[in-house]
Amino acid sequence: MGQISEQLPIVVESLNIGFLQTLKLFFVTLTGSFPLGLVIAFGSMSRFRPLSYLTKLIVWIIRGTPLMIQLLIIYYFPGLVLHNPIWGSGEAGRFLAASVSFIFNYACYFSEIYRGGIQSVPIGQEEAGLVLGMTKPQIFFKITLLQMIKRIVPPMSNEIITLVKDTSLARIIALQEIIWAGQAFMKGSHGISGAIWPLFFTAVYYLIFNGILTMLLGRLEKKLDYFR
């Protein structure tokens, strides 16, 4: 116990740095994937069939393959195949590649949720809006969007919670997120090796963050109850 108490400040400091990287990847992913997912949803619902088929094919590929493979391909393909390492080197390059991978992956998942939410709004409401002289953009933003948000909050919440845990996959391209930091103490880091107990601390970080997100998303869902 004495040895652990001596090592604890070193471990916590390292985990905090890794968790900040995890948080940054999480928020960057949400910031990019929310609007991109809506664009992809519109593409899949387009009446222009070539665009609709192409969008659905891309979504099918992304949803049908593991995120880990997508990370590896996006990070290594430009350098190994095109001989143009566009991501650069170092932690910043790995973070950029991970961000692009996560944003595109989650945008495809969100697009299906958006599509389901939009199509669940009765078509009669759009027809009523047209009769009242509203344009299609006005109908979407003033009628469809608000009702869609209420319908998509539960499935979106599940995807957001999953994203918190999926950020750990970024270590496959050596991005130093929190699990990378915890696992490093098993291999030898800061003079500590063969220590597995820091990994249990990483679980605590995830549990606390997921608990906060669950509470916030639950409050959001209650505030949208007026759409029932």
Image: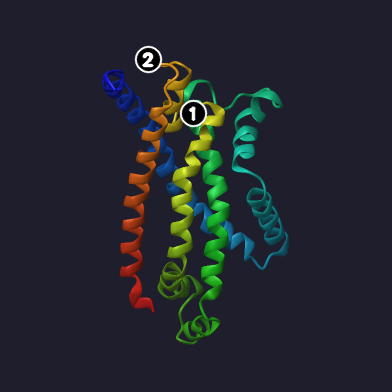
Q: Check whether the beta carbons of the residues at disc 2 and disc 1 lie within 8 A of each other.
A: no
Q: Dot 2 corresponds to which residue?
A: 190
Query: Where in the figure is residue 120, as x and y percent of width and height?
Result: 53, 75
Residue at the extreme top of the image, as rendered: 191
Q: Tell me which numbered mark, 2 or 1, is placed earlier along the sequence.
A: 1
Q: Is residue 79 above or below residue 98?
A: above
Query: Where in the figure is residue 167, as x and y percent of width and height?
Result: 48, 40
Q: How crowded is the residue under tag 2: few (<14 C-alpha within 10 Å), some, or many (20+)?
A: few
Q: Is residue 62 above or below residue 137?
A: above
Q: Dot 1 corresponds to which residue?
A: 175
Q: Work out whether residue 105 or residue 202 is closer to the camera in this orientation and state it.
A: 202
Q: Is residue 195 above or below residue 41?
A: above
Residue type at mark 2 is His
Residue at image location 64% in from the left, 54% down from the top: 59
Q: Quadrant of residue 184?
A: top left
As measured in the structure, the alpha-carbon distance from the residue carrying label 2 to the one carrying label 1 is 18 Å
